[in-house]
């Protein structure tokens, strides 16, 4: 459990730095823009690796169960995951979905975390998905306070094309299908369903 907590502190901690413009400015001033980005990437990677390993380790060791969700909630989780993949794609493509949601990546993270909290009641899952949910909620509040540039999310160039949203939805559905079919087991080690 310690590795999971350390990973979450590193990963979510470094992702909280942009919420604190003074801290980010201080780090950028000391390290330069590229130095800051390099540190951000390094800490993010280390945190993500520790989180993934720690989560698997905690589940393998039998993390205590805090609540036992009914089996049918797994179907709700699968349904909620459909827009998650669409919103992830929309975060990086100029489209109307992005304009409506303003920050589709954060919406995707919140939906992903919430849906997984519905289906997983062990302590490791509550820490992992609850931590990401809390971070996404706080980041969305922070984005609103930081102004229009921050609320744009990942930078995308250009105006939405005529069929941008159709492509975003199709790519999102294909990714969802691949995750249900094979990728969830290959990447996460747990079968869907």
Image (spheres, grey):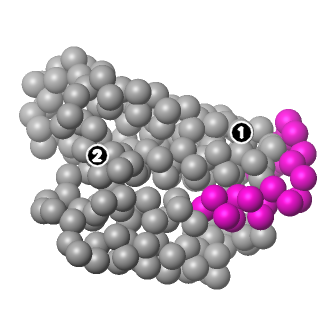
Instruction: Using the rendered image of the protein, determine whether residue 13 is visible from the camera's viewpoint.
Output: no
- Decide which of 38, 133 is in the foreground and name it: 133
Residue 153, label in figure: 2
Magenta segment boundaries in residue numbering: 59-81
Report the residue marked by disc 1: 126
Q: Quadrant of the C terminus?
A: bottom right
- Decide which of 97, 112 is in the foreground and name it: 97
- Give yes or no for residue 147 being in the magenta stretch: no
Q: Quadrant of residue 19?
A: top left
Residue 158 spot, x, y in % from top left:
13, 62
Give the mark nearer the N terminus: 2 vs 1: 1
Which residue is farthest front?
162
Residue 82 spot, x, y in % from top left:
57, 66
Graded by Cα atoms within 10 Å as few (under 14), some (14 to 19) or many (20 or more), the crowding at tag 1 reads many
Is residue 173 shown left or right of residue 121? Answer: left
Residue 146 spot, x, y in % from top left:
25, 26
Residue 14 spot, x, y in % from top left:
37, 34
Q: What element carries label 1?
A: helix
Q: Quadrant of residue 5?
A: top right
């Amino acid at each position: 459990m310690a590795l999971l907590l350390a990973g979450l502190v590193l990963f979510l901690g470094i992702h909280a730095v942009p919420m604190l413009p003074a801290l980010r400015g201080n780090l950028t001033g000391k390290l330069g823009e590229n130095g800051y980005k390099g540190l951000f990437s390094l800490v993010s990677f280390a945190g993500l690796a520790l989180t993934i390993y720690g989560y698997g380790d905690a589940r393998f060791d039998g993390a205590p169960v805090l609540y036992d969700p009914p089996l049918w909630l797994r179907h709700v989780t699968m349904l909620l995951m459909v827009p998650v993949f669409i919103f992830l794609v929309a975060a990086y493509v100029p489209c109307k979905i992005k304009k409506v949601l303003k920050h589709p990546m954060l919406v995707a993270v919140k939906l992903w975390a919430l849906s997984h909290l519905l289906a997983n009641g062990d302590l490791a899952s509550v820490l992992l998905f609850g931590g990401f949910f809390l971070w996404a909620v706080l980041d969305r509040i922070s984005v609103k306070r930081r102004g229009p540039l921050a609320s744009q999310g990942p930078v995308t160039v250009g105006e939405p094309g005529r069929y941008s949203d159709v492509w975003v939805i199709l790519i999102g559905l294909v990714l969802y299908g691949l995750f249900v079919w094979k990728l969830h087991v290959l990447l996460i080690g747990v079968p869907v369903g």
